[in-house]
Image (spheres, rainbow, N blue to C red):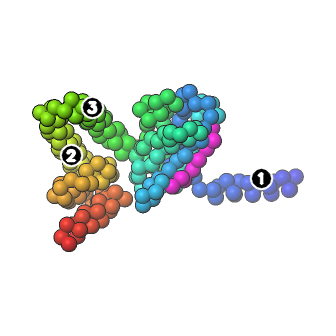
C-alpha cells in the first residue's frame, strides 16, 4: 500500500511539474484518409517543424507549440502526394481551432483563435479579391499577346499596374488603421516589402511602443534600416 501511495505521489508531482504548451492547435480535416500534419514556423527563411502528427481518418487532431508572442504559424498537410497543402494563421497563446476539408484544404479553412487572426482574416478577405482580379488580368494579357494586339496588351499592363497600386494602398491603409495589432507590421513585411520606403516608414512610425517592440515590429525596423542603407550606398 505504501508503495502505491509513493508511486501516486510521484506521478502527481510529475504531472504538476509538466509545463503546459503555450499554444494548442486542434481541428478536423473532412475527407482525409491518411496523412501527416506538421505545425511549422518560419525561422530566417526556412520552415521549421515544431510538432507533427500522423493521422488516419477524420478524427480531431491536436498539435502543440511554445510561443513567446503572437506569430504567424503554418499547418502543413503531407498526404504522400506531390502537392503540399499549407494554411497560414496568426497564432497567440491559448487554443486555435482549424477545421477544413481535404479537397480544399486552404480555401475551406475556418480558423477560430487569436484576436490577431480575426484581423488577419479581415485583411485576407480583401486581398483575395485583388488576387482574383490579378489572375483575370494575367489571362487578359495572355490572350492579348496571343492575338498580337498592342492596344489590348497596353491596356492589360496599365490595368495590372493600377491594380498593384490599389493593393499596396489598401495594405498601407489597413496597417495604419490597425496599428495597435501585430498584424500591421506583418502585412507590411509580407505584402509590400518592395513598396516605396516612405510608406514602410509611415507604418513603422505609427506603431505604438508594444507593437513596435513585437516580433514583426522589430523585423520591420531592421528591414527598413537595411533598405535605406542599400539605397544610400
Is residue 51 rendered magenta in the image? yes
Quadrant holding the C terminus: bottom left
| Mark 1, residue position | 8
Dot 2, how many residues are within 10 Å of its Cα: few (below 14), some (14-19), or many (20+)?
many
Residue 138 in magenta stretch: no
Determine the CA span between mark 1 and mark 2.
Answer: 60 Å
Please tell me whether mark 3 or mark 2 is closer to you in this view. Answer: 3
Q: Which type of secondary structure does the marked residue at label 3 adopt?
A: helix
Q: Nearer the viewer, mark 1 or mark 2?
A: 2
Tag 2's secondary structure? helix
Q: Is residue 85 visible?
A: yes
Q: Position of residue 110 (x, y in %)?
A: 43, 33
Q: Residues within 10 Å of mark 1 (few under 14, many from 20)?
A: few
Q: Position of residue 100 (x, y in %)?
A: 48, 31
If you read the primary sequence from the N terminus, does the residue marked by circle 1 or circle 2 appear first?
Answer: 1
Residue lying farthest to the bottom in this orientation? 233
Q: Which residue is mark 3?
A: 139
Q: Residue at x 56, y 38 (%)?
A: 81
Marks 3 and 1: CB-CB under 8 Å?
A: no
Which residue in the structure is indicated by mark 2?
168
**Disc 3/disc 2 C-alpha distance (Å):** 21 Å
Amino acid at each position: 500500500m505504501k508503495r502505491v501511495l509513493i508511486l501516486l505521489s510521484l506521478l502527481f508531482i510529475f504531472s504538476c511539474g509538466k509545463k503546459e504548451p503555450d499554444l494548442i492547435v486542434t481541428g478536423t480535416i473532412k475527407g482525409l484518409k491518411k496523412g501527416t500534419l506538421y505545425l511549422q514556423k518560419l525561422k530566417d527563411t526556412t520552415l521549421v517543424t515544431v510538432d507533427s502528427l500522423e493521422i488516419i481518418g477524420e478524427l480531431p487532431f491536436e498539435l502543440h507549440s511554445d510561443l513567446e508572442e503572437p506569430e504567424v504559424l503554418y499547418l502543413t498537410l503531407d498526404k504522400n502526394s506531390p502537392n503540399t497543402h499549407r494554411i497560414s494563421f496568426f497564432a497567440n497563446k491559448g487554443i486555435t481551432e482549424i477545421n477544413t476539408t481535404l479537397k480544399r484544404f486552404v480555401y475551406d479553412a475556418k480558423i477560430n483563435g487569436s484576436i490577431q487572426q480575426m484581423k488577419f482574416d479581415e485583411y485576407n478577405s480583401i486581398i483575395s479579391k485583388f488576387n482574383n482580379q490579378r489572375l483575370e488580368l494575367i489571362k487578359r494579357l495572355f490572350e492579348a499577346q496571343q492575338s498580337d494586339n498592342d492596344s489590348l496588351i497596353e491596356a492589360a499592363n496599365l490595368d495590372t499596374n493600377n491594380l498593384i497600386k490599389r493593393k499596396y494602398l489598401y495594405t498601407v491603409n489597413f496597417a495604419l488603421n490597425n496599428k495597435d495589432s501585430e498584424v500591421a507590421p506583418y502585412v507590411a513585411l509580407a505584402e509590400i516589402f518592395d513598396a516605396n520606403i516612405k510608406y514602410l516608414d509611415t507604418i513603422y512610425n505609427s506603431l505604438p511602443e508594444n507593437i513596435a517592440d513585437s516580433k514583426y515590429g522589430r523585423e520591420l525596423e531592421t528591414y527598413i534600416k537595411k533598405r535605406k542603407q542599400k539605397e544610400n550606398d
